[in-house]
Amino acid sequence: MLMKKSEFIQIKGLDLKELKVKHRALREEIANLTLDKNMKKLKDLKTISKKRKDQAQILTVIRQKELLQELESKIETQKEVKADFKTKRSKKV
């Protein structure tokens, strides 16, 4: 049940919305598995911990993508500020 390397690479290729949908589905699945465990229906108790690990990997990828977007937007604004500064400076001379 653990995510294979190929699945993990595929998850890294998804965009944020798709990742959040996958996270929500996993969270619901973990909740259902926990209910099954509490009602003594679940045979393999390791399934929950495996799903939690998958969830943690997805959350890690989501956070990485969010940080990357923040960094890209900061770089873009810095470039705009530098370009504005250069144009103002060239007009003075």
Image: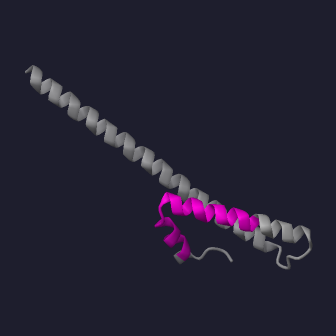
Q: Which residue is outermost to the top?
A: 92
Q: In this picture, is 87 found above or below 50?
A: above
User: What x and y, as percent, mark residue 64?
Assistant: 51, 54
Is residue 20 covered in magenta?
yes
Q: Which residue is outermost to the bottom?
A: 43
User: What x and y, as percent, mark residue 49?
Assistant: 76, 67
- Residue plotted at (83% across, 73% down): 45
Is residue 18 covered in magenta?
yes
Occupied quadrant, residue 74 = top left
- Residue plotted at (55% across, 71% down): 8
| Color theme of the render | one colour
Q: In this picture, is 67 found above or below 12?
A: above
Q: In this picture, is 81 found above or below 41?
A: above
Say which quadrant the C terminus sits in.
Answer: top left
Say which quadrant the N terminus sits in.
Answer: bottom right
Total numbered badges shown on the rendered structure? 0
**Overall secondary structure of the magenta section:** helix
- Residue plotted at (88% across, 76% down): 41
Locate residue 91 relative to residue 39 in the image: left or right: left
Locate residue 7 relative to residue 76 in the image: left or right: right
Occupied quadrant, residue 88 = top left
Which residues fall within the magenta stretch?
7-30
User: What x and y, as percent, mark residue 58?
Assistant: 59, 62
